[in-house]
Image: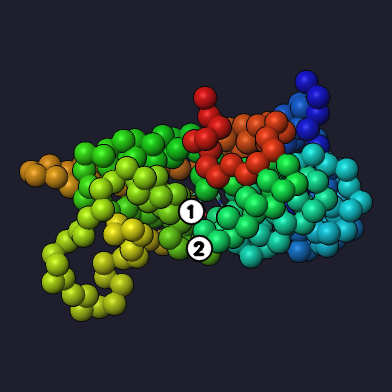
Amino acid sequence: MEKIRIILAGPRGKMGMEALNLIYQTEHFELQAAIDRKNGGKLISSIEGLPPIDAPIYEDAEQCFKEIDADVLLDLTTPEVGRIHTELALKYNIRPVVGTTGFNEQELKELAKEAEEKGIGVIIAPNFAIGAVLMMKFAQMAAKYFPDVEIIEQHHDQKLDAPSGTAIKTAELISRVRQEKQQGHPNEKETLQGARGAIFNGMRIHSVRLPGLVAHQEVLFGGNGQILTIRHDSLHRSSFMSGVKLAIEKVMNLNVLVYGLENIIE
Ligand SMILES: NC(=O)C1=CN([C@@H]2O[C@H](COP(=O)(O)OP(=O)(O)OC[C@H]3O[C@@H](n4cnc5c(N)ncnc54)[C@H](OP(=O)(O)O)[C@@H]3O)[C@@H](O)[C@H]2O)C=CC1
Ligand SMILES: O=C(O)C1=N[C@H](C(=O)O)C[C@H](O)C1
């Protein structure tokens, strides 16, 4: 199998470190460089706790894309930075695989347009865990029969975006099949602002942030005399890595933007 040459943005992060190990252990993956906001000019192998890969670290993403020959950018950073990296990678004909969450609808549309114009594959996956993708698909199936639904997502307290990318993606998938419905009592009033959560097409999304959590989501459906709960738990970030691997392989044969791993798993 031909090697896939990768640039990783965010190598010191929780996901970035897990991804570095994946790249190191995968024979047909090769780390060409990393983009970080620290340690510019050093090698990944010289940073304590990171695997012994002799790939250079760049603090300037554009310089990295200019100087390094790569097939794929894997971005695991923050919403603002991830957006800039994705655009820059497209400019330099490098295929972005983006795990970073927090992109809004407009940003996704613009990136899809840029990818299509350049004919370069992009994968933006709000959740790389196969169990989470199935949870979203099962929730979409259930929503056809249960239009009353609330989403409760729970994450570690270092998470920057709320609601999570997974919760938004779940609500989007459900919206495609759910009949429009005003949920709850028509005269409902919040006596404390935010008590009923965020609203996405009439559905409520509740975000919990606590130390000790990793990434968890429940989709609750209510019907006459019954509740259906669909739940997924990521207990460790290794849960995301088979999806990261698949996305890196699949993006090589795409020429448009794909949003969500459910569109590429067989
Ligand atoms: N799609 C999926 O399945 C998953 C997606 N995520 C998403 O992935 C992203 C990363 O998550 P996580 O690893 O937990 O977060 P972390 O905060 O642990 O890691 C983010 C890393 O990005 C670095 N960073 C910030 N700015 C820059 C920059 N300008 N250039 C390069 N690196 C930069 C941070 O550096 P510093 O430490 O200096 O701030 C940090 O090391 C988040 O958006 C999260 O929501 C997370 C899990 C699964
Ligand atoms: O920040 C995280 O941790 C996670 N982010 C993604 C999201 O926003 O859905 C995926 C997963 O939930 C972990």
Q: Tell me: 98 left or right of 39.
A: left
Q: Tell me: 90 left or right of 133.
A: right
Q: Secondary structure at mark 2?
A: loop
Q: Which amino acid, mark 1?
A: Gly
Q: Classify mark 1 as within 8 Å of ligand 2 or not, answering yes or no.
A: yes
Residue 196 in percent (x, y) is at: 26, 67
Q: Which amino acid, mark 2?
A: Asp
> Label 2, on which residue?
161
Q: Nearer the viewer, residue 172 or 227?
A: 172
Residue 148 in percent (x, y) is at: 21, 50
Q: Residue at x 43, y 60 (%)?
A: 163
Q: Residue at x 41, y 50 (%)?
A: 172
Q: Residues within 10 Å of mark 2 (few under 14, many from 20)?
A: some
Q: Tell me: 227 left or right of 130.
A: left
Compared with residue 139, is residue 208 higher up or lower down, i.e. above or below? Answer: below
The quadrant in which residue 250 appears is top right
